[in-house]
Image (cartoon, rainbow, N blue to C red):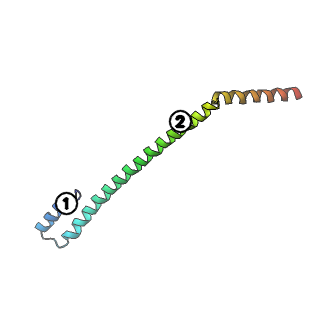
Amino acid sequence: MHSCNIPAVLVFKLLLRYRKKRAKHICSFYCWFEMFDAAKNKLWVKVSYLMIALTMTEYIYMVIEDKKVARRHESLTILNLEKKASLREEAAMKAKTK
């Protein structure tokens, strides 16, 4: 017996006690909703695991890329300083031409 059948079985027994004709149909209807909720929860767990796996692969990729950049002796600070120096040189050249 599945865990989703427990409340449905109780409903089925109550309906049999009152001798309703469509007891089996109603029982399967309630069980279907519980099965749907269980499947939705399982899907959310799988999506969560997928997101964790993607995050871990992204971290590993970033570590690999950082090691490549460290071997080339590059950093954002050095790149920004070089860019600022080139902008200053361009500004100085424009000032001289005016």
Residue 1 seen in the current view: yes
Amino acid carrying label 1: it is Met
Quadrant the C terminus occupies = top right
Q: Where residue 15 sits: x, y (%)?
A: 15, 66
Amino acid carrying label 2: it is Val
Residue at screen point 37% across, 54% down:
43
Q: In the rendered image of this protein, does residue 11 appear above or below residue 43?
A: below
Q: Secondary structure at mark 2?
A: helix
Q: Quadrant of residue 13?
A: bottom left
Instruction: Please name whichever residue, 69 or 47, is drawn nearer the observer in this view of the structure.
Output: 69
- Which residue is identified by label 2? 63
**Image label count:** 2
Residue 98 seen in the current view: no
Residue at screen point 67% across, 27% down:
78
Q: Is residue 46 left or right of residue 81?
A: left
Residue at screen point 72% across, 28% down:
82
Q: Which mark is residue 69?
A: none
Q: In the rendered image of this protein, does residue 14 appear above or below residue 66?
A: below
Q: Where residue 48 sits: x, y (%)?
A: 40, 47
Q: Quadrant of residue 20?
A: bottom left
Q: Earlier in the sequence, mark 2 or mark 1?
A: 1
- Which residue is identified by label 1? 1
Instruction: Please name whichever residue, 86 or 70, is drawn nearer the observer in this view of the structure.
Output: 70
Mark 2 and mark 1: Cα distance apart in space = 49 Å
- Of tags 2 and 1, the one toward the viewer is 2
Q: Secondary structure at mark 1?
A: loop
Q: Quadrant of residue 67?
A: top right
Instruction: Please name whichever residue, 47 or 16, is drawn nearer the observer in this view of the structure.
Output: 47
Q: Is residue 4 left or right of residue 61?
A: left
